[in-house]
Image: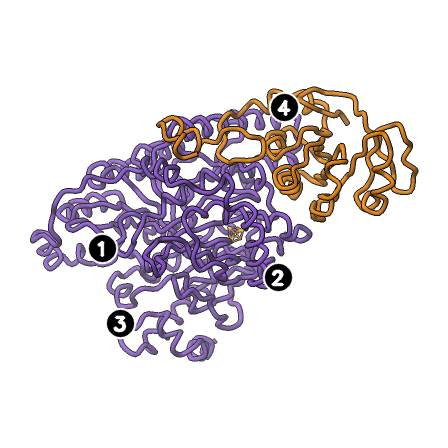
């Protein structure tokens, strides 16, 4: 599955480690959410970056105490239709201030890229090669956005005020 | 009327180009029908029994005459020359080829219309009072709020893949014509003790398989908090709404399972964290949207001009039409005119391209170029000078738009049913057509008085049978079409679900049984002015049941 990061197809520097297996030091690993919580102090002692794959039916609030030491959070899209990960992503970025890599994994198709970007994801395990290759085109299709989200793009509501010179007083 | 600014227009065009690419990928075999299904549903394209159907949004039911001509053009160019207006202020085209879908959408975009979010598990087209801006009992135009929410919910980065579809209705009048209590979120504009206008927030109403009347979770919401509070509701729902069972995925089930109080507390909690953030609405932001709504430049006229009074007393046909189709306008000398899309023997809600063009012309001549789509599958000319009513009526007759049955027994709401819909158990449209024939006599219909019949072809309740004064629901028994009947439902501020009358009846009997129900009502009512729903409320369904089933 190709990985897209910062708009480019890249090599994944993280290795997924199954729940029973040991997490070798020296390489970046991703572990399951339950295991991470159970072994957090030990895992965070390692020198290499640690990532967590977090289930979409559990509040991301449980991760909050560790977020400044976690390099990556992967959120799951078991199907294209399941949108819980979008809320989790926004909460991680906008409420809990997570600055690390936020990865979308599962059934990730080109038609979600822009929604995902706007929700705060910056890396994507894409289901189809052709979709990964189309990343740039798919995410440049729109330049008009109504909703404020953590990505900081100017909203239409704001641009309207700027246009008529109300921006300064309204801010 | 709201006019798109360059941002709105750009977004709609960008969406057309995205959809064009999605269709191209489907036709090239890069997407399976399963994958494409979710994408097409995000843009109002359904696969029906015989063809693809396109549902275009008519936000809060307001159309300009040019937009109506645009719809006529689409009906003519890409469909079979007609369109179907729905109960949710949308229009459906039943026969569009997938290859032509992108061009159809581009044509719609050229007149400021779109099909975004008219299906799929997202915030759907937001509906309001069909008389918004002209109703005498309204204290603010709810469409400004519907438009703000339309924009905010369009391609929302967090809420485009909700557990299930999500419908919002807004009403700003004392009398609720938007059925806010049977929506996922219903917003009723209210005034608090200090005279400030805000919103009562109702959640978890809905029809379908498990009907519920919504619960108030916030009695008064300030305008500045309109978006942040709705965002909080959607965020709680997106995370906690059930996704394991499609029939339990609507917010009404979450509200029911958690209890309204617990749900309200969750929302309140979430809301507190975001209410002072970027979603807090600046009055200038509201004003910028409101400024793009235009209102007619009315003449100073007085009510009931003498020519009108004369026509009403001298011409019985005109008087019958006037009594059913004409309603009070807030502006003296003007009237709200409903155009019946329920001709005797016709399918409810259909309009031909020629009728659409004619309506557009009449709107230009008589209604400041404005048209509304109502929830009863009728159209409305919202600003007609009373002195023009006779002439308008004559014109409407030529186009078969003056059936004097608005609000009466033959003004039937029906879903597409087995004639089009792949989920249907039974036919809806032919039942409606037969009933209009049974009650075709205008004098009879008038003597029966206000009576709403709603027909759904299956439990999904697209015809809103639960809230019909008489509700008819198609069910299947051993491969045969049967119909359940409920009485006493209503959608207004006293919203109530209908009560089952008795055993389901066969297709061949349904019209007879409904006639018997209506006869029973005429016999049972205390006086002619007692409406059908009020008689049912007073007596319950038992006396109806006795009369209707005794003979069978
Ligand atoms: S109520 Fe059933 S039959 Fe009628 S349109 Fe809806 S899904 Fe189809």
| Chain letter of disc 1 in the image | B
- How crowded pointer 2 is (Cα within 10 Å; few <14, some 14-19, many 20+) is rated as few
* A69 left or right of B88 in image: right
Q: Which label lies toward us, 2 or 4?
A: 2
Q: Which residue is mark 4?
A: B28
* Residue at screen point 58% across, 53% down: B269
Same subunit, tags 3 and 4: yes
As measured in the structure, the alpha-carbon distance from the residue carrying label 2 to the one carrying label 4 is 46 Å
For marks 1 and 2, the one nearer the N-term is 2
As measured in the structure, the alpha-carbon distance from the residue carrying label 1 to the one carrying label 3 is 20 Å
As measured in the structure, the alpha-carbon distance from the residue carrying label 3 to the one carrying label 2 is 43 Å
Q: Name chain A's colour.
A: orange
As measured in the structure, the alpha-carbon distance from the residue carrying label 1 to the one carrying label 4 is 55 Å
| Chain letter of disc 3 in the image | B
* B333 left or right of B174 in image: left
Q: Quadrant of residue B150 in the image?
A: top left
Q: Which residue is mark 2?
A: B258
Contact (CB < 8 A) between labels 2 and 4?
A: no
């Amino acid at each position: 599955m190709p990985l897209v990061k910062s708009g480019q197809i890249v090599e994944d520097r993280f290795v997924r480690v199954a729940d029973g297996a040991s997490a070798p030091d020296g390489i970046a690993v991703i572990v399951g959410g339950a295991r991470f919580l159970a072994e957090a102090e030990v895992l965070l002692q390692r020198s290499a970056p640690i990532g967590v794959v977090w289930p979409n039916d559990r509040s991301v609030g449980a991760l909050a105490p560790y977020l400044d030491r976690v390099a990556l959070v992967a959120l799951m899209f078991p199907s294209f239709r399941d949108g819980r990960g979008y809320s989790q992503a926004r909460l991680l970025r906008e409420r809990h201030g997570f600055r690390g890599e936020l990865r979308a994994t599962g059934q990730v198709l080109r038609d979600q890229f822009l929604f995902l970007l706007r929700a705060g994801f910056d890396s994507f395990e894409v289901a189809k090669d052709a979709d990964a290759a189309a990343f740039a085109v798919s995410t440049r299709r729109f330049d008009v956005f109504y909703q404020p989200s953590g990505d900081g793009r100017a909203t239409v509501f704001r641009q309207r005020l700027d246009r008529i010179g109300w921006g300064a007083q309204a801010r | 009327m709201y006019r798109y600014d360059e941002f709105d227009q750009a977004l709609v065009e960008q969406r057309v180009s995205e959809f064009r690419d999605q269709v191209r990928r489907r036709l090239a075999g890069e997407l399976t029908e399963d994958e494409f299904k979710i994408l097409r549903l995000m843009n109002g394209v359904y696969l029906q029994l015989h063809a693809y159907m396109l549902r275009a949004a008519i936000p809060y039911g307001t159309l300009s005459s040019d937009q109506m001509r645009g719809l006529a053009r689409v009906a003519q160019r890409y469909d079979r020359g007609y369109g179907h207006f729905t109960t949710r202020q949308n229009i459906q085209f039943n026969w569009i080829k997938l290859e032509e879908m992108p061009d159809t959408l581009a044509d719609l975009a050229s007149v400021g219309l779109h099909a975004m979010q008219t299906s799929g598990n997202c915030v759907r087209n937001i509906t309001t009072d069909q008389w918004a801006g002209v109703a005498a009992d309204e204290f603010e135009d709810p469409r400004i709020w519907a438009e703000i929410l339309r924009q905010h919910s369009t391609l929302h980065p967090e809420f485009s893949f909700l557990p299930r579809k999500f419908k919002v209705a807004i009403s700003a009048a004392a009398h609720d014509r938007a059925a806010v209590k049977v929506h996922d979120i219903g917003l009723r504009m209210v005034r608090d003790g200090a005279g400030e206008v805000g919103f009562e927030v109702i959640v978890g109403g809905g029809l379908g398989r498990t009907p519920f009347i919504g619960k108030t979770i916030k009695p008064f919401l300030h305008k500045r908090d309109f978006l942040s509070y709705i965002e909080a509701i959607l965020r709680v729902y997106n995370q906690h709404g059930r996704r394991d069972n499609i029939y339990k995925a609507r917010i009404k089930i979450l509200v029911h399972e958690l209890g309204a109080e617990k749900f309200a507390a969750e929302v309140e909690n979430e809301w507190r964290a975001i209410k002072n953030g970027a979603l807090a609405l600046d009055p200038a932001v509201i004003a910028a949207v409101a400024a793009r709504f235009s209102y007619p430049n009315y003449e100073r006229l007085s009510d009931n001009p003498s020519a009108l009074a004369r026509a009403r007393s001298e011409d019985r046909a005109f008087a019958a039409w006037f009594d059913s189709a004409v309603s009070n306008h807030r502006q003296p000398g003007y009237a709200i005119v409903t155009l019946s899309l329920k001709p005797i023997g016709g399918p409810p809600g259909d309009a031909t391209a020629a009728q659409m063009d004619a309506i557009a012309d009449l709107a230009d001549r008589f209604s400041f170029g404005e048209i509304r789509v109502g929830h009863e599958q009728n159209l409305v000319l919202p600003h007609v000078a009373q002195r023009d009513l006779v002439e308008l009526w004559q014109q409407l007759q030529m186009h078969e738009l003056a059936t004097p049955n608005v609000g009466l027994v033959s003004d039937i709401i029906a879903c597409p049913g087995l004639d089009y819909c792949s989920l249907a158990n039974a036919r809806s449209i032919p039942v409606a057509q037969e009933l209009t024939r049974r009650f075709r006599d205008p004098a009879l219909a008038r003597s029966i008085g206000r009576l709403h019949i709603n027909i759904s072809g299956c439990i999904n309740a697209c015809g809103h049978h639960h809230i019909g004064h008489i509700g008819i629901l198609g069910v299947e028994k051993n491969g045969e079409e049967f119909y359940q009947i409920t009485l006493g439902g209503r959608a207004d501020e006293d919203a109530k679900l209908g009560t089952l009358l008795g055993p389901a009846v066969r297709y061949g009997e349904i019209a007879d049984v409904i006639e018997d129900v209506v006869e029973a009502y005429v016999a049972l009512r205390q006086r002619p002015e007692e409406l059908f729903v009020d008689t049912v409320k007073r007596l319950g369904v038992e006396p109806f049941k006795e009369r209707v089933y005794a003979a069978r």
